[in-house]
Amino acid sequence: MSQPEKPNLDLINLVQRGRMQYDSSARPSQISGPYWIEAVRRPDIDAPGPTPRAAYWQITTTLEAVDDLWAQIKAATEAGKLGYKSKVATASRDAHSNTRVIYVLTYDRTDTADVERVRAALEALGLSATWHPD
């Protein structure tokens, strides 16, 4: 029995870098193709990467406010002040909905100190978020 081919990680990394480059200047209110725009912590910041126990804080906002709010969360994520990654919904599942969601992902839901650190950082930004540990 032959082994399945291993995925081409160089190609996967190339696609991911291209996506992140696209996402770096995208405005959520102006995008309807990809469902999410993502921001990640800068690679020079020493912090844990995601585990299978990753979870997220959810922030619900409006179409009118999403661009400014995303700019704030994106900057904080890249600076290492929030989780390892954040993402914002670009298109609502309901075409008539005015809401958008932003997820701030924590690397491990069992690291209560880190979960609390992210909550406090969101609060310091003036944001209210709902915790989703599963």
Image (spheres, rainbow, N blue to C red):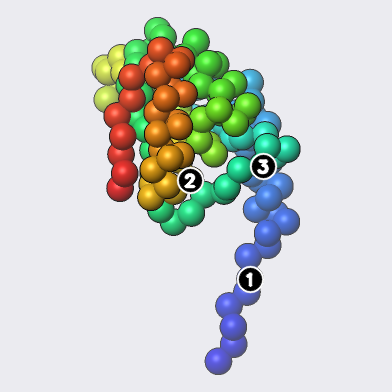
- Between disc 1 and disc 3, the foreground one is 3
Distance from the alpha carbon under mark 2 to that under mark 3: 13 Å
Distance from the alpha carbon under mark 2 to that under mark 1: 26 Å
Can residue 117 be seen at all in this image of the molecule?
A: yes
Q: Residue furthest bottom?
A: 1
| Badge 1: residue crowd in 10 Å (few <14, some 14–19, many ≥20) | few
| Contact flag, marks 2 and 1 (Cβ < 8 Å) | no
Disc number placed over residue 46 in the picture, else none: 3
Q: Quadrant of residue 21?
A: top right
Q: Quadrant of residue 6?
A: bottom right
Q: Amino acid at mark 1?
A: Lys
Please name the residue shown 50% across and 10% down the image. Answer: 68
Disc number placed over residue 6 in the picture, else none: 1
Residue 118: percent from the left, percent from the top? 45, 31
Quarter of the image that includes the N terminus: bottom right
Residue 57: percent from the left, percent from the top? 37, 32
Local SS, label 2: loop
Q: Is residue 2 above or below residue 58?
A: below
> Which residue is more in the foreground, 14 or 82?
82
Distance from the alpha carbon under mark 1 to that under mark 3: 29 Å
Q: Earlier in the sequence, mark 2 or mark 3?
A: 3
Local SS, label 3: loop
Q: Is residue 58 left or right of residue 114?
A: left
Can residue 36 be seen at all in this image of the molecule?
A: no
